[in-house]
Image (cartoon, rainbow, N blue to C red):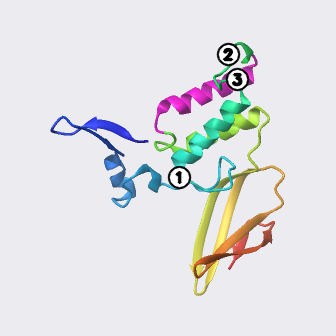
Amino acid sequence: MNYTGLNSLGVSVNYDNTQACVTCHGSSKTHFSDWQAAMDYDGNGVVQDVQTEVKGLLAKLALALPHNADGSFNYAQITTQTQMKAYWNYQLIDNDGSFGIHNAKFAFDVLTKSLAALGQTTPVELTTFTAATNNTTVNLTWQTATETNNQGFNVERANGNSFVKSVLYPEKELQL
């Protein structure tokens, strides 16, 4: 999210206000786009920064709710309790304005569960992912909250300037 403010000379400037983040995250993150999402939440095939993933989920949720030809919500057709809750959740995350920066886990959880309640599915909801080295071996471990139509996990590793795709792993633990 890009804030607009006035500097000490009264000139308008655009900036990402990350000063409050330094205490917990250090000074290396100077733009909100520096915070990468843990996975591809919006299902577009690319793991992006938190705000872009949240915006992608908002777009999917907007399409899952009744809407007019111009893309605006059709309030007259938002009639079920599930639709009303999903619409409320959409407004909650959209109007917060941070697009997940303040609490990414909460934003992802609210939006993916709203989509699931409307019959849209997120194939895998990853809750934890850890990597630990043991001499020349890397141990990967992960947990999921939900899996829908998931046959396993493809893991890639760097090989110079390219990535090598591994085989499909149905387990949630891997040694490379």
Query: Residue at horizontal 21%, vertical 39%?
Result: 7
> Would you say 97 lies left or right of 125 here?
left
Location of mark 2 (residue) = 75
Label annotation for residue 49: 1
Outermost residue toward the top?
Answer: 76
Decide: is 7 above or below 49.
above
Q: Position of residue 56 (x, y in %)?
A: 62, 42
Quarter location, residue 63? top right
In the rendered structure, which segment of residues is drawn in magenta? 79-98
**Does 49 appear in magenta?**
no
Location of mark 3 (residue) = 69
**Does 94 appear in magenta?**
yes
Outermost residue toward the left?
Answer: 9
Neighbour class for label 2 at 10 Å: few (<14), some, many (≥20)? few
> Would you say 23 lies left or right of 35 here?
left
Mark found first going from the N terminus, 2 or 1: 1
Q: Position of residue 17 (x, y in %)?
A: 34, 45
Neighbour class for label 1 at 10 Å: few (<14), some, many (≥20)? some
Q: CB atoms at circles 2 and 1 under 8 Å apart?
A: no
Query: Residue at horizontal 15%, vertical 38%?
Result: 9
Residue 110 visible to an observer of this rendering:
no
Q: How many marks?
A: 3
